[in-house]
């Protein structure tokens, strides 16, 4: 096999290997978690358990986080007309990050009868990683505003995370969960750590570099062989 053909074959093999690694990239882990909400309402305390689902979709340099309720929580002694109820919530961050993420959604699209569980619409917000590593998302406070009143519901059963994401801070900076890191050649520089979506970019760039290097090498070898034959 000639040098140019051998170089092209090696480049193709590297690209296929990169594709195999992409297929094996870890996905986000999500669970539907039962949350026991205790609510402080204008007419007294109420409680209700609702399964909570939290999903994350890559959006630019961050993630679009969506929180869903599978059952209604709290209730109103009077009917809430269309658009009378506005929900919002916070999601507690854990693992490599900390703090809370605010999520919100539209008012109720249909009237809610009196004394029936209030179904919360999906609430969303954008999460931008500040650190690299595994970040957990756990249901926190739910706030319901309706007819000039505010109802605050907090989890009473210390729920586990509904979502875990492998994330990378902007520029690849930040520390990973557990503080572990690798260095190259003893220089102390951390190797880049990427999440599922960032792995695609990083490995795609690596594959492109290999292909470009292979093409350049093939061109150099061809010119060198031609020069030698002359």
Image (cartoon, rainbow, N blue to C red):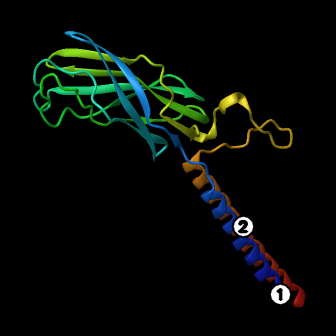
Q: Secondary structure at mark 1?
A: helix
Q: Nearer the viewer, residue 157 or 148?
A: 157
Give the quarter of the figure containing the N terminus: bottom right
Image disc number at residue 226: 1
- Taking 160 as reference, is 3 left or right? right
- Taking 126 as reference, is 192 left or right? right
- Taking 209 as reference, is 102 left or right? left
Quadrant position of residue 32: top left
The residue wearing badge 2 is: 14
Q: Tell me residue 4's x, y (percent).
A: 77, 81
- Taking 109 as reference, is 123 left or right? right
Which residue is depicted at the point 62% across and 58% down?
Answer: 22
Which residue is depicted at the point 45% across and 19% down?
Answer: 157
Indicate whether 36 appears above or below 122: above
Q: Tell me residue 218's x, y (percent).
A: 76, 77
**Nearer the viewer's eye, disc 2 or disc 1?**
2
């Amino acid at each position: 096999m000639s040098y140019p053909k051998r170089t092209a074959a090696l480049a193709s093999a590297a690209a296929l290997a990169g594709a195999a690694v992409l297929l094996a990239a870890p996905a986000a882990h999500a669970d539907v978690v039962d949350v026991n909400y205790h609510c402080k309402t204008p007419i007294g305390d109420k409680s209700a358990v609702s399964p909570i689902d939290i999903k994350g979709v890559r959006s630019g340099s961050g993630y679009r986080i969506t929180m869903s309720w599978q059952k209604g929580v709290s209730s109103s002694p009077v009917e809430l007309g269309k658009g009378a109820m506005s929900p919002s919530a916070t999601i507690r961050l854990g693992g490599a990050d900390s703090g809370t993420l605010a999520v919100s959604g539209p008012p109720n699209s249909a009237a809610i009868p009196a004394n029936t569980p209030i179904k919360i619409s999906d609430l969303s917000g954008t999460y931008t990683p500040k650190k690299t590593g595994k970040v957990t998302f756990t249901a926190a406070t739910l706030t319901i505003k309706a007819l000039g009143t505010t109802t605050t519901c907090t989890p009473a059963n210390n729920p586990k995370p509904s979502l875990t994401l492998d994330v990378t801070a902007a520029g690849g900076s930040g520390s990973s969960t557990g503080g572990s890191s690798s260095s190259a050649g003893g220089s102390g520089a951390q190797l880049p750590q990427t999440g599922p979506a960032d792995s695609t970019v990083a490995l795609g760039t690596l594959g492109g570099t290999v292909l470009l290097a292979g093409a350049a090498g093939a061109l150099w070898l061809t010119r060198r062989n031609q020069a030698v034959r002359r």
